[in-house]
Image (cartoon, rainbow, N blue to C red):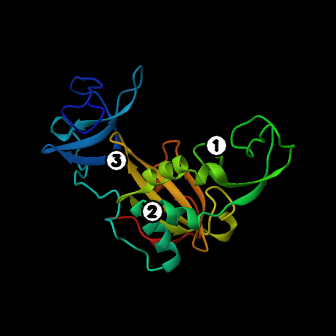
Amino acid sequence: MRERPSTASVSLGCYKDGVLLKDRGETRTAEGITWVGVMAPKGPGEAPGWASAEFLEAPGRDMSVKPISHPSGTRTGDTAIDAVIAALEAGDKEAVARIAQFQAVPCSNEPGLGGPPNCSRDMAEGTLIEAMPGGACEGGWWLKDEFLSPAGLSRLVETYTGPLLYAVYRPPSSMQRRWPEGEVIIVYARDLGFGRFAQTVGVTDGRIVSTWGGCGTKPEDILKDVSGVTVVLAPPK
């Protein structure tokens, strides 16, 4: 079992016949080998990894490789949404800066994860500052100046540039102010070698209003338990 789908990757362990490895439901081909995403047995060192299908017994398991994202240039047909997708796909920092939208949020000095943005030293509690919802597990905020800085824009476009588009959904109105925020949720699939993970961009009226990703969430898990979702662009098949 290896960390990534490659014979040159770090070994995560070698297991005897009959040991059960949990199937993560992912398949890759590399170096002429079909690799299956698995989890190491429970215990010290448990981690996601990859094992060659040659050494696995998985009757009825579909070993075909499924695309994890749409090819570059895929669009929804909705001009406002497609402008956001195009800007991110191209890594166009100036375009991303133009379509980013922030909201006035009261700052707070109360400790805690996922809360309002912190006040700076010269700000009174409750001072309104411009920010955008954006974070990982607990949520958080992009401060406008941080988001629009050269480093912030570089970090953002590096996350979304390239053929990573997975799907586009329109959640019911009851969810549009919940996390992730937006009238439309663009879902991206990032392949980190040991698994694919979701990153999302929330869009309202053609403007980026939120970003979110983390906690090991898979692209197919975004909004899967939500009723009333409208599919704008279906996941790849």
- Closest to the camera, between mark 1 and mark 2, is 2
Disc 2 packing (10 Å; few <14; some 14–19; many ≥20): some
Point out the image quarter for the N terminus.
top left
> Spatial distance from mark 1 to mark 2, Cα to Cα?
28 Å
Which amino acid, by three-letter code, is at mark 2? Answer: Asp
Q: Up-down: is 203 above or below 197?
A: below
Numbered mark located on residue 25 in the image: 3
Q: Please tell me which residue is depicted at 57% across the width and 67% down the height of the picture.
A: 99
**In the rendering, at what x and y percent does residue 134 appear?**
61, 51
Q: Please tell me which residue is depicted at 20% across the width and 48% down the height of the picture.
A: 29
Closer to the N terminus: mark 3 or mark 1? 3
Numbered mark located on residue 138 in the image: 1
**In the rendering, at what x and y percent does residue 78 appear?**
48, 79
Which amino acid, by three-letter code, is at mark 1? Answer: Glu
> Spatial distance from mark 3 to mark 2, Cα to Cα?
34 Å
**In the rendering, at what x and y percent does residue 164 appear?**
38, 58
Query: Disc 1 vs disc 2: Cβ atoms closer than 8 Å?
Result: no
**In the rendering, at what x and y percent does residue 39 appear?**
36, 34
Q: Please tell me which residue is depicted at 26% across the width and 26% down the height of the picture.
A: 11
Closer to the N terminus: mark 1 or mark 2? 2
Closer to the N terminus: mark 3 or mark 2? 3
> Spatial distance from mark 3 to mark 1, Cα to Cα?
26 Å
Disc 3 packing (10 Å; few <14; some 14–19; many ≥20): few
Numbered mark located on residue 92 in the image: 2
The image quadrant that residue 12 belongs to is top left
Q: Up-down: is 15 above or below 172?
A: above
Q: Please tell me which residue is depicted at 60% across the width and 52% down the height of the picture.
A: 147
Secondary structure at numbered mark 3: strand
Q: Up-down: is 162 above or below 7?
A: below
- Closest to the camera, between mark 3 and mark 1, is 1
Secondary structure at numbered mark 2: loop
Point out the image quarter for the C terminus.
bottom left
